[in-house]
Image (cartoon, helix red, strand yellow):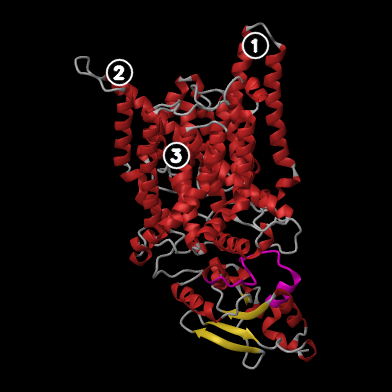
Amino acid sequence: MPDRDVADRPMIDWPAWAAATPVLLVAVAWVTVPGLAATYALGLRGIGAWGLAPVVSIGSVAGGAVVAGQLGLPWSPAVAVGPAVVLALLAVGARLLPAARRRRGGPAGGASRPGADGARHALAATAGMAVAATIGTLTVASAIGTPSRLSQTYDAVFHYNAVMEILSDGTASSLQLGRLTTPTADIAFYPAAWHDLVSLVVLTTGASVPVAATAAVTALACVVWPLSCLVLVWVICGPVPAAVALAPVVAVGFVSFPWSLMGFGVLWPNLTGLCLTPAVLAVVVALCRLGPPVDLGRGTAAVLLPVGAGTLGLAHPNALFSLALLAVFPVAWALGRAARRRLRGGERIVPAGLVLGLAAGIAAAVWFVLTSPVFDDVREFDWAAYQDPGRAVGEVALGATNNRPAAWALAVVVLLGLGAACLRPAFRWLVPAHLLSGALFVLASAQETEFAAAVTALWYNDSYRLAAVLPVTAAPLAVLGLLAVGLLVSRAWPVRARPPSAAAGALVAGLLVLVASGGMYSARNAEFVRSSYPGPQAESDLLDPDEAEFYERIGGLIEPGAVVAQNPWSGSALLWPLTGHEVLFPHLTGDWSADQVLLARRLRDVQDDWRVCAAADRLGVRYLLAGTADFWLGDSRARRYPGLEAPAPDSGFRLVAAAPDADESALYELTACDGAPGNRPG
C-alpha cells in the first residue's frame, strides 16, 4: 500500500486511551463474565472455562435481546445476563441431582476438575494472552489514534445508528433491528449481537457510541479472538504449555482476520461471529474426540454446541456457515474412524450407513443452499474477480490475501504445520479444512463463473469474507508448525550437548517469528485498519472534520426528542451517534416508508404541499439539516433527496445555524407546521 499523507496517520492519543481504559475493561467483562458463570457451573475450569466463556456471554446478550423483544421487555443489562444465569442454574441443578450424577458417572458430562490444567498450563496461556492482547491493542490504537474516532465507511453508518436505535427504542432483538432501514416490515432480521454488546457498554459506562464501539471491537479482536484460538489449539493439541502460549500470539498476526474486517466494510457483525468460530469448532472437535484427552467432555460439549451455533447465527450467519464448512472434516474423520472400527469387528451395514448418511447430509445441505429461496438475497451479490487463479493461490499460501504484502514468517510455519498435520491422524482433518477455505477464496477472487458464484454465495461472493475464514485453521496449523520445529531442533541437537526440550525449541521458534514479523505485522495490520478511520486533518467523502465539528456544535441547539431530516449522503446520518439526536434517514440506503419518501422529495416545498406537515408530525420531524451530498463513490442514489436541500427564504423554515466552511451545511427549524392543522399550508 502506498504511503498515506502524514495528516492521515493519527498519532496515538495516549490520554484519551487512558480515559477509555475503563470502558474497554467493561467491554471485556461483558464478553467474558456472564459466560464464565455458566462454564464454571458446567464444570469447566482453566482454559476450557475461559476460552468458551465468550461464546456463552455473547449468546446470552444476543439471545436475551430476542427473548425480551418477543416478551415486550425493555432492553437492559439484566435482560442480557438472563440466559447465562439460567444456563448456570440448570447446570448446577443437573449436577446436584443424584440421578443425573449416576447417569454421568461423575462430573457433568466429563467436565474438568478444578486445577486440571495445572499451574504451568494456566501460566503459559496467561502469558500468551497478555502478549496477544498487548500487540492487538497497540495495533488498534496506532490505527485510529483516538478511541472516539468514527469509522467512515458505508456499513459503519448503519452499525452506529443501529446502536442508537437500540438505546432510543429499548429494543435490541435481531428479529427487529433490520427495521432501521425497513421501517414498515413486521419482522426484519439483522444479526444484532455486536450492536447489543456496544449498547450494553454505553448503558453501563455512559460512554459515547463511537467510544463504546471502539472498545467492543478492541475486546473482540484482542481478547475474544486469541482466546477462541487458544481453546481450539488446547482441544487439538492437548494441554501442552508451549502450544497454549503460542496460540493467542500467532492468532493476532493474520491480516485477513481480524484486521481485514476492521478496515473493509466495516464488517463488525462478521467480526463478532468469526471471533467465536474457533471456540465453537473446538466444541465440535471435542465431541468427535479427535485430539488428546482434555477436560471438555462430550456431555458438556453437547450442551455448548447448540449454544454456540445459536450465538454464531445471532452474531452473523456467515460465521455459522463457516463453522458448518469447517466442521464437516472433524465429523467425517470421527465417522470414518468409527466405520473402520466396525469393519474390523466384522460389521458391514453400520459402516456403510455412517458413510452414506454423511454423504447424504452434505449433499442435502449443498442442494438446499444452492436452490432455497431463503438465500436469494445473498445470491444477488457479485463481487468481481480481481486476479488470476495462480496469483490467488499464492496469496493463500503467503498469507497475502486481497493484495496484501506476503507474511513470510507466518506463511512458513503454517506450511510446516500442514506437513506436521499430515503425519498425525488426529490432526489430518485440518489439512482439507484449510485447503477448502483457500479454494473458496480462490474462486471468489479469481473466477467469474456460475459455479464460483454458487459455491461462494453464502459469503456474498466476497473474497474478504472468505479470506477471513482462513486464520481459523491457519492459527492451529501455525502452532503445529512451531511445535514441529521445536521437536526437530531437539532431535537434531549434537549428541554431546544437552539438547533443549521440544517445548523450549518451539517457544524460541515462536520468538523468532515474533521478531521477524515485526510484532506479528502490527504496523502493517494497523495500516489496513487505518484506511477506514481518516486522520484528524484528512479529507473524507463522508464526514470531514469541519462537518463533524459543526454537527457537535448544533447538537445543543436541537430540541430534545425532535427528529432531524437530512440527506444521509452528506454525512449527516452520523449526526445521531455524534449528538444523540435522531435523524430521519439513519443509513445511506433503505426501504423507506411512504412518509419518509415524501419528505425526501417535498420537505422544502412544505408551503405548496399540505401532505408534508402531516408526514412530519407522524415522524416527529422538526428540523432540516441541509448540506451538499458528496455523491460518495459517485453513487447516484445521493440525488434521491431533492426535498432536503437548503430551502428558499420565507419558505416555512427558520435558519438556526450555518457553517459555510463545512460544505455549506446549515440547520433549519421547520416553522410552517407550528400552527393548528386548519391554519397550516395547503
Q: Which residues are magenta?
A: 579-600
The amino acid at mark 1 is: Arg
Is 421 on the left or on the right of 591, as rendered?
A: left
**Crowdedness near tag 1: few (<14), some (14–19) or many (≥20) residues, C-alpha within 10 Å:** some
Question: Looking at the image, is 276 positioned above or below residue 588?
Answer: above
Where residue 552 sits in the image (x, y, percent)? 49, 75
Residue highlighted by disc 1: 342
The secondary structure type at the circle numbered 1 is helix
Secondary structure beneath dot 3 equals helix
Please check the rendered image and state whether residue 141 is part of the magenta-colored stretch, yes or no. Answer: no
State which quadrant residue 34 falls in: top right
Upstream in the sequence, badge 2 or badge 1? 1
Amino acid on which the number 2 mark rests in the picture: Arg
Front position among marks 3 and 2: 2
- As for residue 585 lying within the magenta part, the answer is yes
Q: Amino acid at mark 3?
A: Gly
Q: Is residue 73 left or right of residue 35?
A: right
